[in-house]
Structures are given as structure tokens and as C-alpha cells.
């Protein structure tokens, strides 16, 4: 019902449900709330798994752990003065570790089930 939402360039799962051919009792506030929980939960679970795999490999490999810690110590000499997100994205080893962690977390051999 919000004008800005109606004029947005992209559609949302909520708009698709509201505009669908579902019977009215299927397009309830409770249904929309449940869909929101599902979307947030799915994003949370995949992120949690990727971070778990990333942390395991960093902690299980002393040389990786040391190199990553050294790069972070150089980039963050004072933890009270954190660098910007953009500055952290420029750290080559951190970026490589994150990319590798993401690929490991998507690998079927690391399936959590």
C-alpha cells in the first residue's frame, strides 16, 4: 500500500505474494511474517555456515592464521580506531581468505548434513 514500494524498480517476495492468485486467506499478515522469517533465516544460516568453515580453516592452519593476523595487525594498529570497510576490503590476504572460505562453504564435501 506504500507509494514508494509500488513505484520501486524491483519487486519483492511480499509484492509477489500480495499480487498472486492465492486465495485471500493465504495472503494474510501471518503469511507475510512467516515469509520474512524464512528469508532472514535463510540468509542467516548460509552466512553462519560460511563463517564457521572460514574460522575452522583459519584456526586449523597455523601458517594461515599467522599470516592473516599479521596482515590485520598491520592494518589495525589501534583496535579502538577501526579502518573503514573499504580499507579492509583492500587487504589482499584477508580478501583471499574470505573468497576461499566462501568457496569451501559452498563445496558439497563440507555439507553440514
Image: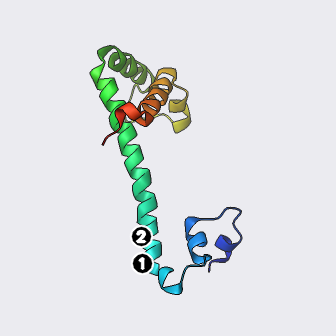
Q: Does residue 46 appear to the left or right of 56 in the view shown?
A: right
- Measure the alpha-carbon separation of dots 2 and 1: 6 Å
Mark 2, Cα crowd under 10 Å, few <14 / some 14-19 / many 20+, is few
108 and 95: which one is in front?
Answer: 108
Mark 1, Cα crowd under 10 Å, few <14 / some 14-19 / many 20+, is few
The quadrant in which residue 38 appears is bottom left
> Where residue 107 sits in the image (x, y, percent)?
43, 33
Q: Is residue 39 above or below residue 71?
A: below
> Where residue 74 sits in the image (x, y, percent)?
43, 20
84 and 61: which one is in front?
Answer: 61
The quadrant in which residue 17 appears is bottom right
Q: What residue appears at the point 55 percent right and 79 percent down from the top-left corner?
A: 22
Q: Which residue is tagged 2? A: 34
User: How is the rendered protein coloured?
Assistant: rainbow
CB-based contact (under 8 Å), mark 2 and mark 1: yes
Quadrant of the image containing the N terminus: bottom right
The quadrant in which residue 105 appears is top left
- Name the residue furthest top: 63
Q: Is residue 16 above or below residue 49?
A: below
Amino acid at each position: 500500500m506504500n507509494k514508494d514500494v509500488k513505484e520501486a524498480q524491483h519487486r519483492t517476495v511480499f509484492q509477489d505474494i500480495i499480487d498472486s492468485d492465492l486465495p485471500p486467506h493465504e495472503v494474510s499478515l501471518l503469511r507475510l511474517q512467516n515469509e520474512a522469517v524464512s528469508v532472514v533465516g535463510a540468509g542467516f544460516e548460509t552466512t553462519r555456515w560460511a563463517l564457521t568453515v572460514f574460522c575452522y580453516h583459519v584456526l586449523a592452519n597455523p601458517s594461515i592464521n599467522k599470516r592473516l593476523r599479521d596482515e590485520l595487525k598491520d592494518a589495525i594498529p589501534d583496535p579502538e580506531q577501526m579502518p573503514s570497510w573499504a580499507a579492509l576490503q583492500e587487504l589482499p590476504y584477508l580478501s583471499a581468505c574470505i573468497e576461499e572460505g566462501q568457496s569451501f562453504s559452498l563445496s558439497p564435501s563440507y555439507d553440514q548434513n
